[in-house]
Image: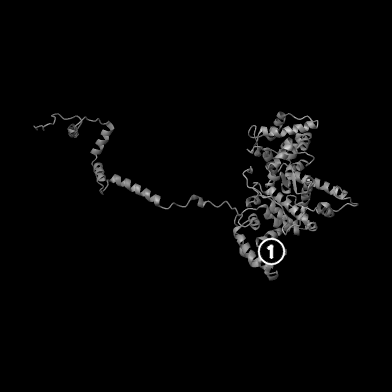
Amino acid sequence: MERAEPGRPDHPDPAGPGQPQLQSRERARPGPRRPMRADMRLRDLSLRQDPDLRQELASLARGCDFVLPSRFKKRLKAFQQVQTRKEQPLPPAASLSIPTFYFPRGRPQDAVNVDAIIAKIERTFAQFPHERATMGDMGRVAKACGCPLYWKGPLFCGAGGERTGSVSVHKFVAMWRKMLQSCHDDAAKFVHLLVSPGGNSLAQEDFIPFLQDVVNTHPGLAFLKEASEFHSRYITTVIQRIFYTVNRSWSGRITCAELRRSTFLQNVALLEDEVDINQLTEFFSYEHFYVIYCKFWELDTDHDLLIDAQDLARHNDHAISTKMIERIFSGAVTRGKKVQKEGKISYADFVWFLISEEDKKTPTSIEYWFRCMDLDGDGVLSMFELEYFYEEQCRRLDSMAIEALPFEDCLCQMLDLVKPQSEGRITLHDLKRCKLASVFFDTFFNIEKYLDHEQREQISLFRESESEGPELSDWERYAAEEYDILVAEEAMGEPWEDGYEAELSPVDQKLSALRSPLAQRPFFEAPTGLGAVELYEYEHGGDDLPPS
């Protein structure tokens, strides 16, 4: 029988082996005994019962190198593999494998044989004295480049010919080879030829050399050679019509994308085949220019090439409301700083006004009048803004002894007409989607056209708006009618001449108009080599409406 050690209890502790020593140490400590939580006790016991873990912890505490147990070797190896993967170079991004889909300068064409084109150009230059081409020779050079005939002006200027009077074969070939390598469609090439150095979009002034060449050489404008003072007015009109149709962003600068989406380059190509320039009604028609300029001349009583609000209010026998005239002169749709400083608009601004007034179905005209009616510029026509313009219409109808429709009833009609997506809020998109935007606008600020719409049945209006591919647009129909009236007045001697005994041919009619006092006014100045075109500088303000 074993003897019990001093101080050791005779019966075993139910806590199990090893506990007596722990209890003896605890009893040896002075002071009160601190209670231990059960989870801490279990964790302490698990650490003490694992000899490998205890040895590892002890080695870590001493900072010594040691061989880790197998399970920790696995953890360390996995950690090192993760770190190695992070340090390895990443594989190529997935986007690099996606084919290129954005071509700001046109999609490259693999079938283009640059050397063959250059050789053809060199053979063309070999026919000129000293292998130098003048402006008169550039038509043949344009054909050798595969371009339309009336690219000859831009090609001549793009190679620096306007500075020296001629272009050498070496300079032109270097310019065109670089063009073929960087510009891959007609829009990119045309912009590159006309754009100012360092730019990537076309301003109004960039079109002057091109249009001056059209005026000088197109057979349909040969009669203008006798009245060079009209060159600048014609060029101004065409430039404004180009920007009116092509510059859909209202930024004042035409980009490659806008030119690519328009029909302008197709019209430039037609200049070569169409002898009668009046058939090109979208941009170049001289008859359209004549109508616009005569309308402006009637309003510009002091003939300073600027008109104020009182002058514009006389258009079409005061058909447009005073409130809308004020909005036009507020700068909502006009360009340049003279509007705000002098309260006048230029001939260039009048071109936009007249086309928008006579054809309210085009996207640009809808944007034009929407800007004017949007008083607070929030992009929405509220009921307050509609009532603001309709009040004057009611007063004018009362003065004509015509009973005006109450605003509530008129509003119901207009909402049924437009069918806005949001109740009580008419957006630009709503009006563009509506096929009767002209009826909507005329109701609120054009008394003559409003009465005309009221006399016609709604069914006929819908049929007219839904007709596919109309032969003439509203603007083309208006310009044709007004030109016939002006020619008839000219033939009868009203208001410019005393009269004619015989009917004039179309060419004689144009020449007689140029010889009239209209063409002899002293305020015209002789144009420079590019025409004395007065263009207001477009501002890049934040008030431009995005295309919807």
* Residue 521 coordinates in the image, percent (x, y): 80, 52
Left or right: residue 6 versus residue 236 is left
Is residue 399 in view from this perspective? yes
Is residue 146 in view from this perspective? no
Mark 1 lies on a secondary structure that is helix
* Residue 440 coordinates in the image, percent (x, y): 71, 36
- Quarter of the view holding residue 457: top right
Q: Which quadrant does the C terminus fall into?
A: top right
Q: Nearer the viewer, residue 240 or 528?
A: 528
Q: Which quadrant does the N terminus fall into?
A: top left
What residue do we see at 90% from left, 52% from top? 502
- Quarter of the view holding residue 158: bottom right
Residue 463 drawn above or below residue 199 = above
| Category of crowding for the residue at label 1, using alpha-carbon neighbours closer than 10 angstroms: few (below 14), some (14–19), many (at least 20) | many
Q: Which residue has dot 1 on it? A: 141
Q: Nearer the viewer, residue 108 or 271?
A: 271
Left or right: residue 178 versus residue 465 is left
